[in-house]
């Protein structure tokens, strides 16, 4: 991060990072200058597990256990989406993410209308990995199920359209939902698809909840991660959302295969799923990132809340020095970049990296004194920061949010559209 210094940006790229003295030497710099004393420049947050298709459902699926949450609420809601409601849901989620400092996400869509999510992301300027949710087993919600080959064919067509699209801002990530909704052929063929597209990720949920784990053991005779290893889909490009319930062997498998964990502390707490053993993952050099998951299981998309919780929930278990503010900030930035295989492009402020940046105003009422050391800054951001501290956000050198206002998005219009599309969706939904 930068407090007393500056960054030079040309086009979409950071070309140089200057300290205070070097910045003074650029007094006659001929390009555009932005002089913002008192603000702190940070790399944009990277959230590698989001469900933009669910933003409209915030507050409509509370106080339920995971499998009931899916069956009784989320699947019926997703089945009721039409293109306008999907686009609006995505747009509202993107607005919340950007205004709270997130510049890159990996999103898992629903089984239909993925093109509307991609449209919203393309128009917004956000950086993202996207992919429709693949499900070919769902007896409890047959409307949220596709024949295996039909699901794979549509994912392949989408990957050909959108992988490395929008000037390289958008990548495709094949996204089988989780073991209980996917046959073995679907999982195997979905992972095999990633070999056809450089940089493509395999994005799924696993080992999230005790009831899910019991059902997986009944069906497969082993844990989620052991099953992925058995069928050959546990690899370096495998991204596992949650990973709360891993046995000793599965920790070793994740480390050996260099698979990546997408940690979602608020979601894990709200659904009663548990607390992921993040310190143990880090000791084993497993890549750990941080994300909010979907709006109905959180109920915010706010990385500040995820950072604070990620640290606090470990301290009663492992002591007050577990997951320091600096470690959590790194997980929220470079950890996310590494999970997405983008560590050479984003996640830190360095020459040659993309200008995906956020400016924070830490001089607010919750931060009454000037933070003098890096440790003070990390503490202020992680333990008492909030979206209210986000001043401006850019992706690829383009301002998306500036001085507390969206550059292109009409905030009020988006909210009004959201209300109307939710009303229409609720009139269509059929609950079991």
Image (spheres, rainbow, N blue to C red):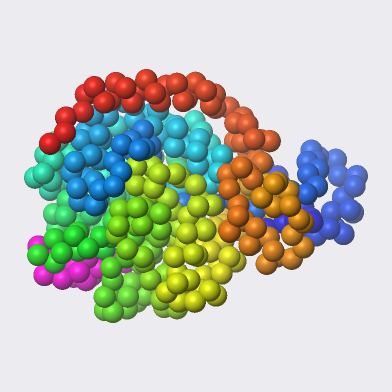
Q: Is any part of residue 7 visible from this angle?
A: no
Is residue 152 placed above or below 250 in the rendered structure? above
x and y, in percent, of residue 251 in the image? 32, 75
For the image shown, how many numbered marks are present on the structure?
0
x and y, in percent, of residue 351 in the image? 68, 57
Magenta span covers which residues?
219-235
Is residue 335 placed above or below 158 in the rendered structure? below
Left or right side of 122 for 22? right
**Which corner quadrant holds the C terminus?**
top left
Q: Is any part of residue 425 visible from this angle?
A: yes
Q: Which one is in front, 392 or 339?
A: 392
Task: Find out whether residue 226 is within the magenta segment.
Answer: yes
Task: Find out whether residue 205 is within the magenta segment.
Answer: no
**Quadrant of the rendered image containing residue 334:** bottom right
x and y, in percent, of residue 399 in the image? 63, 37
- Say which residue appears at 37% left-offset and 20% top-offset: 420
Q: Which one is in front, 273 or 135?
A: 273
**Quadrant of the rendered image containing residue 151:** top left
- Say which residue appears at 13% left-offset and 40% top-offset: 141
**Which corner quadrant holds the N terminus?**
bottom right
Left or right side of 380 for 73? left
- Say which residue appears at 57% left-offset and 61% top-offset: 329
- Say which residue appears at 52% left-offset and 58% top-offset: 308
**Quadrant of the rendered image containing residue 369:** bottom right
Q: Which one is in front, 18 or 75?
A: 75
x and y, in percent, of residue 258 in the image? 38, 71
């Amino acid at each position: 991060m930068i407090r007393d210094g500056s960054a030079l940006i040309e086009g979409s790229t950071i070309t140089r990072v200057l300290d205070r003295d070097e910045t003074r030497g650029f007094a006659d710099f001929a390009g555009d200058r932005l002089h913002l004393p008192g603000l702190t420049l940070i790399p944009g947050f990277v959230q590698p597990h989001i469900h933009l298709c669910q933003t409209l459902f915030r507050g409509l699926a509370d106080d339920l256990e995971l499998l009931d949450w899916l069956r009784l609420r989320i699947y019926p809601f997703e089945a009721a989406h039409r293109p306008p409601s999907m686009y609006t849901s995505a747009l509202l989620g993107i607005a919340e993410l950007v205004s709270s400092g997130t510049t890159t996400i990996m999103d898992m869509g629903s089984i239909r209308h993925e093109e509307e999510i991609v449209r919203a992301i393309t128009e917004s300027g956000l950086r993202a990995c996207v992919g429709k949710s693949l499900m070919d087993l769902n007896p409890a919600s047959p409307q949220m199920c596709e024949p295996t080959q039909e699901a794979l064919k549509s994912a392949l067509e989408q990957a050909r359209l959108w992988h490395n699209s929008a000037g390289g801002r958008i990548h495709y990530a094949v996204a089988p939902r989780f073991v209980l909704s996917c046959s073995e052929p679907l999982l195997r063929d979905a992972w095999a698809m990633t070999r056809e597209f450089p940089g493509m990720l395999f994005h799924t949920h696993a080992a999230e909840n005790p009831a899910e784990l019991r059902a997986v053991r009944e069906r497969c005779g082993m844990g989620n991660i052991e099953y992925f290893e058995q069928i050959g889909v546990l690899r370096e490009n495998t991204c596992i959302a949650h990973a709360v319930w891993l046995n000793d062997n599965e920790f070793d498998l994740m480390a050996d295969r260099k698979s990546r964990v997408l940690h979602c502390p608020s979601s894990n707490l709200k659904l009663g799923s548990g607390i992921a053993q993040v310190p143990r993952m880090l000791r084993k050099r497993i890549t750990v990132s941080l994300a909010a998951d979907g709006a109905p299981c959180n109920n915010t998309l706010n990385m500040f809340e995820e950072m604070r919780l990620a640290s606090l929930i470990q301290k009663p278990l492992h002591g007050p020095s577990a997951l320091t503010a600096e470690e959590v900030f790194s997980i929220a930035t470079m950890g996310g970049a590494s999970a997405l295989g983008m560590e050479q492009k984003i996640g830190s402020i360095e020459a040659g990296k993309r200008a995906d940046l956020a400016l924070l105003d830490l001089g607010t009422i919750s931060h009454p004194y000037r933070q003098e050391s890096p440790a003070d800054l990390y503490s202020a951001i992680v333990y008492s920061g909030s979206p209210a501290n986000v001043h401006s956000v850019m992706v690829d050198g383009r301002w998306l949010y500036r001085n507390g206002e969206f550059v292109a998005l009409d905030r009020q219009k988006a909210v009004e559209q959201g209300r109307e599309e939710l009303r229409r969706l609720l009139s269509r939904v059929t609950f079991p």
